[in-house]
Image (cartoon, grey):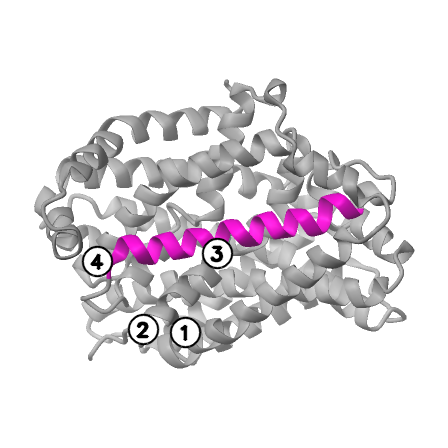
């Protein structure tokens, strides 16, 4: 069967950006900024994106593009042996668990969207959360079902511009609120005293999360890129869109929080418990709430789509070697089903009827979140850089760069220095930081 490819350069950028732009940008980035000193965090974040995000995204894209395979096949093709099969397995396992946790938060976004459109809807108990999870899975599965071109690429080309428009409208509206200036100062007035090792490691972790590094999405989407495309410029565009949305989301949220007398240091609940109150007080608040939660839903669902595609493509590849290969549609149903199941257990663990899913004082949701973000994702990212830096033929990267950058190959030397030495140490430090050891 001929593998589908993205049709256009714009399509590649929109599809990859739609996968990268998610709750990490709109839910997580603003509260991390609020907790880590505003502009100081923003500056460090942008440096991290350029210095570390860019080369790592290029690496994953090149792995997909050169091998033309899903995560499952890419390591095998590039290494020329099966010794590295553990990394794709670990990637797919982490992705399944990450989607499970992510779906719970996406379910809340769907619920808040419905509530802001129909304020009198009765939506009180944990079961409505599960219903909203299911709606999110259903929509995501439908998009993947429609295929790489007709589903993922086409819908990303429609929804990414809409998402950008909504976030711009929100940021501009909020900028005109009385009292918003204080929030904008917090965001953009750099105060060096706020810088710390902690801020740097948080920014690095956020950079990896926001750009979906180590989740296999870039390898999978890389395998759909037409051969003549320049990977560096594609990645540059994706990074620009991802960072722009994160900064605009912060501009929409932080000044609003300041204008209504709340503190930006509220952590994860900033978007779900502080903002609805802020919207209630704001003139035209209901429209703002609808736009904001629609923004969150679009961002979250398109990100889930990208990770479901990782699982689906890998499952199809694995089964292709079996006696009865799976069709793509069947593979989507299996992966969607398993992720939905994980998310139902995670959502249940947060309700009163889910006491049996709580141990060590923490819910299943917390355990999975910690397991994936502190251990599994860093391990995948670490193994990938070691794999590509030390075990893949250097000509793979050289041949990819040569047609676009000719003999200016000193950049390759810098790249290999980063990927062989700096990145493994950095990823290790991020992991220690998220576990709480440093
Ligand atoms: N880059 C995505 C984000 O910022 O939200 C990361 C992501 C996490 C994508 C979990 C998809 C997902 F299910």
Q: Relative to the observer, which residue lies in front, 150 or 51?
A: 51
**Residue sitting at 21 percent across and 55 percent down?**
74
Q: Position of residue 38 (x, y in %)?
A: 65, 33
The percent position of residue 246, horizontal first and vertical second, equals 57, 49
> Picture coordinates of residue 150 (x, y %)?
40, 81
Nearest to N terminus: mark 2 or mark 3:
2
Earlier in the chain: of badge 2 and badge 1, it is 2
- Give the structural element (helix, strand or loop) at label 3: helix
Segment tinted magenta in the rendering: 230-256
Residue highlighted by disc 2: 6
Residue 246 seen in the figure = yes
Looking at the image, is mark 1 or mark 4 nearer the viewer? 1
Q: Is residue 320 above or below residue 383?
A: below
Label 3 beta carbon within 8 A of ligand 1? no
Q: Secondary structure at mark 1?
A: helix
Residue occupied by mark 3: 241
In this view, 303 is above or below 271: below
In the image shown, does 177 or 378 lie closer to the viewer? Answer: 177
| Mark toward the viewer: 3 or 1 | 3
Query: Disc 4 or 2, which lies upstream in sequence?
Result: 2
Spatial separation of the CA atoms under disc 2 and disc 3: 19 Å
Tag 4's secondary structure?
helix
Which mark is drawn over residue 73? 4
| Contact, mark 3 vs mark 1 (Cβ under 8 Å) | no
**How far, Cα to Cα, is label 1 from label 4?**
22 Å
Q: CA distance from mark 3 to mark 4?
A: 29 Å
Q: Can you say which quadrant of the picture contains the N terminus?
A: bottom left
Classify 387 as above or below 6: above
């Amino acid at each position: 069967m001929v593998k589908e490819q993205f049709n256009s350069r714009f399509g590649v950028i929109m599809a990859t950006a739609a996968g990268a732009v998610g709750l990490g940008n709109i839910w997580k980035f603003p509260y991390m900024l609020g907790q880590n000193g505003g502009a100081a965090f923003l500056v460090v974040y942008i440096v991290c994106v350029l210095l570390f995000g860019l080369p790592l995204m290029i690496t994953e894209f090149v792995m997909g593009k050169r091998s033309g395979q899903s995560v499952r096949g890419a390591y095998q093709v590039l290494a020329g042996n099966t010794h590295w099969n553990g990394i794709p397995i670990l990637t797919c396992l982490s992705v399944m668990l990450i989607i499970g946790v992510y779906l719970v938060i996406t379910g809340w976004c769907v619920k808040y969207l419905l509530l802001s459109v129909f304020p009198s809807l009765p939506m009180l108990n944990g079961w409505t959360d599960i219903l909203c999870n299911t709606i999110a899975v259903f929509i995501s599965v439908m998009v993947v079902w429609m295929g790489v071109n007709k589903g993922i690429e086409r819908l990303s080309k429609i929804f990414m511009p809409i998402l950008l428009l909504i976030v711009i409208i929100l940021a501009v509206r909020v900028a005109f609120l009385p009292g918003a200036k204080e929030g904008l100062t917090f965001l953009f007035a750099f105060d060096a005293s706020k810088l710390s090792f902690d801020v740097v490691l948080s920014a690095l972790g956020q950079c990896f999360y926001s750009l979906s590094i180590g989740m296999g999405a870039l390898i999978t989407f890389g395998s759909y890129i037409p051969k003549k495309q320049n990977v560096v410029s594609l990645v540059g565009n994706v990074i620009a869109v991802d960072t722009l949305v994160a900064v605009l989301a912060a501009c929409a949220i932080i000044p609003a929080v300041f204008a209504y007398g709340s503190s930006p240091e509220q952590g994860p609940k900033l978007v779900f418990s502080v903002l609805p109150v802020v919207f209630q007080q704001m003139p035209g608040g209901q429209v703002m709430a609808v736009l904001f939660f629609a923004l969150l839903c679009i961002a979250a669902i398109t990100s889930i789509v990208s990770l479901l595609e990782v699982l689906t493509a890998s499952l199809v590849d694995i089964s292709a070697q079996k006696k009865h290969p799976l069709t793509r549609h069947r593979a989507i149903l299996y992966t969607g089903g398993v992720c939905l199941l994980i998310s139902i257990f995670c959502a249940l663990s947060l309700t009163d009827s889910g006491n049996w899913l709580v141990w060590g004082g923490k819910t299943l949701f917390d355990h999975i979140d910690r397991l994936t973000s502190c251990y599994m994702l860093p391990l995948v990212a670490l193994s990938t850089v070691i794999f590509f830096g030390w075990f893949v033929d250097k000509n793979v990267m050289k041949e990819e760069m040569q047609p676009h950058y000719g003999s200016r190959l000193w950049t390759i030397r810098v790249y290999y220095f980063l990927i062989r030495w700096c990145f493994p140490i950095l990823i290790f430090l991020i992991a220690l930081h998220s576990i709480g050891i440093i």
